[in-house]
Image: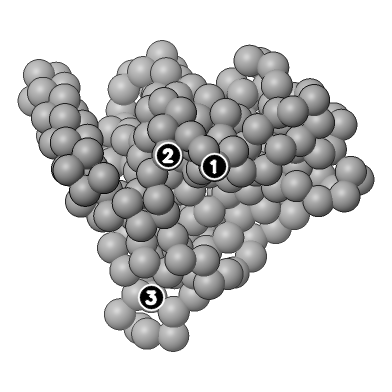
Amino acid sequence: MLMRLKNVIFLVLLLKMCVIFGQGKEHQKRIIVDVGHGGKDPGAIGINGIQEKDVVLAIGKEMIRLNKLIFGDEYDIYLTRYDDSFFSLSERINLAKSLRGDIFISLHCNSFYSDARGMEIFTFISESKKFEYNTRTSIALGNEILRGSTFKINIENRGMKFADFQVLREMFKFCPAILIEVGFLNNPVEAVHFSRPSGITAIALAILSGINNHLKSE
């Protein structure tokens, strides 16, 4: 597994460096998108068998496509997986650290009672002043994505929250980090939304637009 991870890191870095130097965009902001679950770990399973691992992978890939199509490839976006492969949380975190991103975003889907709906975003709070910038920036980024999603696709805003998730706790030391629960797969309306390509495009664009608005306002 360690050898496979090293090979993945090497190939991803090599391909990305070729793209960066080939296009002369050495100063792009780098966005790491952690695509949750994968392979043997489906994550939440919703209505009609829709699986969290498939939804978040589709969103991550669509963010890459829209970055090129709409934003002129302005951002350097990496995913922690590009297919239905399983990597442990620690492996994904180590990969994300090695990529030295400016922003880290972990994508997930919720599952609860059928009336639950909407997007909520988590970040980690540290009492250390050393990470004051990351705290402030993570909150601002999360709120911008929530506002954009609420306005553009009329998704319910469940607010900015704080949690001691491992992925946030560890990545927070390196860059602003948030975890997005994009919606509820067991909600009839949201499950249908995420099962359609148009729904995936809408949420990916809302997230990417939120990122763009935040970075432009810094």
Residue that lies at the very extreme toward the right in this rendered image:
115
Q: Which residue is mark 3?
A: 132
Which circle's residue, 1 or 3, is located before the other in the chain? 1
Mark 3, other Cα within 10 Å: few <14 / some 14–19 / many ≥20: some
C-beta proximity under 8 Å, tags 1 and 2:
yes
Report whether residue 195 is seen.
Answer: yes
Q: Which residue is mark 1?
A: 41
Name the residue nearer the viewer: 168 or 121: 168
Image quadrant of residue 200?
top right
| Image location of residue 52, percent across then percent down | 62, 37
Instruction: Name the quadrant of the N terminus.
Output: top left
| In this view, 114 is above or below 84 | below
| In this view, 189 is above or below 128 | above
Q: Secondary structure at mark 1?
A: loop
Q: Which residue is mark 2?
A: 86
Q: CA distance from mark 3 to mark 2?
A: 33 Å
| Image location of residue 12, percent across then percent down | 21, 32
Q: Secondary structure at mark 2?
A: loop
The amino acid type, in three-letter code, at marker 1 is Asp
Q: Is residue 5 left or right of residue 196?
A: left
Q: CA distance from mark 1 to mark 3?
A: 34 Å
Question: Which residue is at a point 22% across and 39% down the rendered structure image?
Answer: 4
| Image location of residue 141, percent across then percent down | 49, 53
Q: Secondary structure at mark 3?
A: helix
Report whether residue 104 is seen.
Answer: no
Mark 2, other Cα within 10 Å: few <14 / some 14–19 / many ≥20: some
C-beta proximity under 8 Å, tags 3 and 2:
no
